[in-house]
Image (cartoon, rainbow, N blue to C red):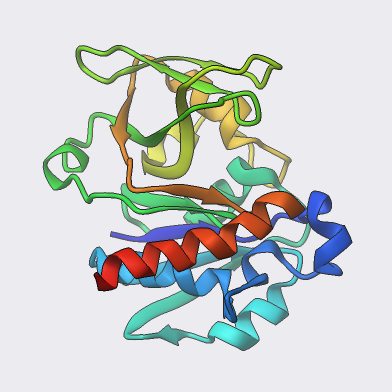
Amino acid sequence: MKTLILCGGLGTRLNSVSNGIPKCMMKINDRFFIYYLLDLLISKGLDDVILCTGHGHKIIKNLIGNRYNGAKISYSKENKALGTGGAILHSLSSFSDRRFFVLNGDSYCDFDLEIEQILNDSLNFIYIHKVQNISRYGEVKINKIDNSVTSFIEKRAHEESGYINAGIYVLNRSIFEPFVKNVFLSLESEILPSLVGKLKGIMCNKGFIDIGTPSSLIKSHIFFADQFTLEKS
């Protein structure tokens, strides 16, 4: 199954520390963030990867090339910023799979590959993670009986626990048919809300981190140090 990693974001909130380098190329504990994502995918048997790039394409391609630890790496390059949904739509012409994985290029969440669920190609899936404070992320509301997504709640200054979007998806290409190519399109605010009723949540509670802000980038150093300490113990 193809896996897309969304690597084309400008990362404006990180400009003070990134100097224009793509977010996925930020170094954490002397490793590029993209390496953590690729290693995670390979550990799950997902070794056919498309990097959806834009800003910083040459930097990313020069580092990764076409192979990484046995995984096949290809590229879908945007000539202008298309947003998360637009980047996926732009990439669809490069492969024919009806279903595929998608990962955000600026967040990490270890997940279980729920084979029986993802083979049910009548549904789309979003991995969700429970946090103690949803105010920074927004919230994914689910039906506790069947884990179907009932709504997406925008960010608000309301500190409480809940489920957030972990930035990992299993999607059918048919959901992109109503949308126009080569225009800015948000997966989070335009496509996912249209899937309510056809979208199920899968829990991933092995830890979550994003590197979208300077403060979360700092926290990621501790996060990955702890993650790999646990793996070795």
Name the foreground residue: 33 vs 105: 33
- Which residue corresponds to the image point at 42% horizontal and 84% vertical from the top-left? 68
Relative side of 111 to 219, left or right: left
- Which residue corresponds to the image point at 58% horizontal and 59% vertical from the top-left? 220
Q: Is residue 214 visible?
A: yes
Name the foreground residue: 149 vs 40: 40
- Which residue corresponds to the image point at 53% horizontal and 86% vertical from the top-left? 65
Q: Name the quadrant containing residue 198.
A: top left
Relative side of 149 to 1, left or right: right
Q: Is residue 213 visible?
A: no
Relative side of 218 to 16, left or right: left
In this rendering, the answer to whether 71 lies above or below 17 is below
Q: Position of residue 66 (x, y in %)?
A: 48, 85
Name the foreground residue: 34 vs 135: 135
Q: Position of residue 94 (x, y in %)?
A: 47, 63
Q: Name the quadrant containing residue 56.
A: bottom right
In this rendering, the answer to whether 195 lies above or below 88 is above
